[in-house]
């Protein structure tokens, strides 16, 4: 039985509480807190800075923001940064967690002026919740019905002005009505290597990895698929490997060994990517081949391949999408050490005279 109780109403110190993510260097410790600390996505950051300063000068909430793009590029981080810059509280939920309109009532009604509501995977909002949130976004009010039948009556509850930030990896699944209600909409792009290197430098400093050099961080940045989340994950795996297998030493050789254990090659491809490419090269002679056929061949879901595997392979030019299906390019075949017929990089022409 506990012998001690906290009886003082004063706030307790949290110095001994580890940051989320464990190991004393969790995601909260690495995540930037202000716009000045955020690296990359410069055009988006410029738009957000202008909107933030303008809203604060007028004493208004910031406009609703829609962020879309592949996972791991900083959509959730930007929501935290916006709330921090506004000096308000952030409420976090997700589309699948909101099954009916009433699920939002408790959150919306307790929000204070200029607070931020972040809805991840907003494209998965049910239609009933989406219609419920329209008046909340436009007029800061919600309407809900009490009783039923002849005794039913509609109650209007006026909300305090707030900012909604929606994040999605499938912007095409959003309805036009919902998309049009966001004042700022932006697609997050993959990061280039210099930005990833700067992110890794900052993360290494916060993880107390002072001995790791720029060459070693560059090796990780090259294999991070243009995604900060992957870069931080690989850095943590290298840190663990160096601690256990290399007496704390982290250099290019240790990084090669650590990432080889993770199945990540020098271009950032993992076992899943290579299985996809190998099926195209060995089974379908480089294509063209339909996505469903590839998925059935390797025993994976077609949607998973389209959302997880293909974006990066398209970005680095290893595959191409043609009218007939997916096509392995000569660059992708060269990486595998496979041979494809000459001229198959270019999509077939509709007319012989083109």
Image (cartoon, helix red, strand yellow):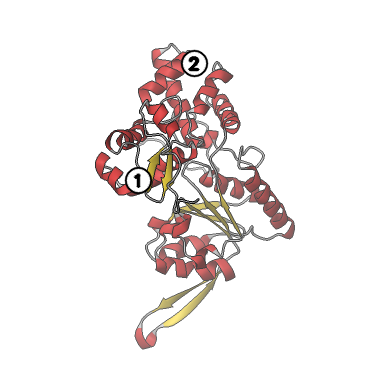
Q: Quadrant of residue 164?
A: bottom right
Q: Secondary structure at mark 1?
A: helix
In percent of the image, x 48 and y 43: which residue is there?
Answer: 7
Using the image as rendered, state which of residue 268 and residue 141 is in the foreground. Answer: 268
Q: Position of residue 198 (x, y in %)?
A: 60, 29
**Is 271 left, or right, of 131 in this rendering?**
left
**Is 188 left, or right, of 297 in this rendering?**
right
Q: Position of residue 101 (x, y in %)?
A: 42, 67
Residue on which disc 2 sits? 252
Q: Secondary structure at mark 2?
A: helix
In percent of the image, x 29 and y 39: which residue is there?
Answer: 284
Q: Position of residue 107 (x, y in %)?
A: 48, 60
Q: Answer few, some or many: residues within 10 Å of disc 2's Cα (few below 14, many 20 plus, some between 14 and 19).
A: some
**What is the residue that sits farthest to the right in this orientation?**
57
Using the image as rendered, state which of residue 118 and residue 10 is in the foreground. Answer: 118
In percent of the image, x 65 and y 46: which residue is there?
Answer: 43
Residue on which disc 1 sits? 304
């Amino acid at each position: 039985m506990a012998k001690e109780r906290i009886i003082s109403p004063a706030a307790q110190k949290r110095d001994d509480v580890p940051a989320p993510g464990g190991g004393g260097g969790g995601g909260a410790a690495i995540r930037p807190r202000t716009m000045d600390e955020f690296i990359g996505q410069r055009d988006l950051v410029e738009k957000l800075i202008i909107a933030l300063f303008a809203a604060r000068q007028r004493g208004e909430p910031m406009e609703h923001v829609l962020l879309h793009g592949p996972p791991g590029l900083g959509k959730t981080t930007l929501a935290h940064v916006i709330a921090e810059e506004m000096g308000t509280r952030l409420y976090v939920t997700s589309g699948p967690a909101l099954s009916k309109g009433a699920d939002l009532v408790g959150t919306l009604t307790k929000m204070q002026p200029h607070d931020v509501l972040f809805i991840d995977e907003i494209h998965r909002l049910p239609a009933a919740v989406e219609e419920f949130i329209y008046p909340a976004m436009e007029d800061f009010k919600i309407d809900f019905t009490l009783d039923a039948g002849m005794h039913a009556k509609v109650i209007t509850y006026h909300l305090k002005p707030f900012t909604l930030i929606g994040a999605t990896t499938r912007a095409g699944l959003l309805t036009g009505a919902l998309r049009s209600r966001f004042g700022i909409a932006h697609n997050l792009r993959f990061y280039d290597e210099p930005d990833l290197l700067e992110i890794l430098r900052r993360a290494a400093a916060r993880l107390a990895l002072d001995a790791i050099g720029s060459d070693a961080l560059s090796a990780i940045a090259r294999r991070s698929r243009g995604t900060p989340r992957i870069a931080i994950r690989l850095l943590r795996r290298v840190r663990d490997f160096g601690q256990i297998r290399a007496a704390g030493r982290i250099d290019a050789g240790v990084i090669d060994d650590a990432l080889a254990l993770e199945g990540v090659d020098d271009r950032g491809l993992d076992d899943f990517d290579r299985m996809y490419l190998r099926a195209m090269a060995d089974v379908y002679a480089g294509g063209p081949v339909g996505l469903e056929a590839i998925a059935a061949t390797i025993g994976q879901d077609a949607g998973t391949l389209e959302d997880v595997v293909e974006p990066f392979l398209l970005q680095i030019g290893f595959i191409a999408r043609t009218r007939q299906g997916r096509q392995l390019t000569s660059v992708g075949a060269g990486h595998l050490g496979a041979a494809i017929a000459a001229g198959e990089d270019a999509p077939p022409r509709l007319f012989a005279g083109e």
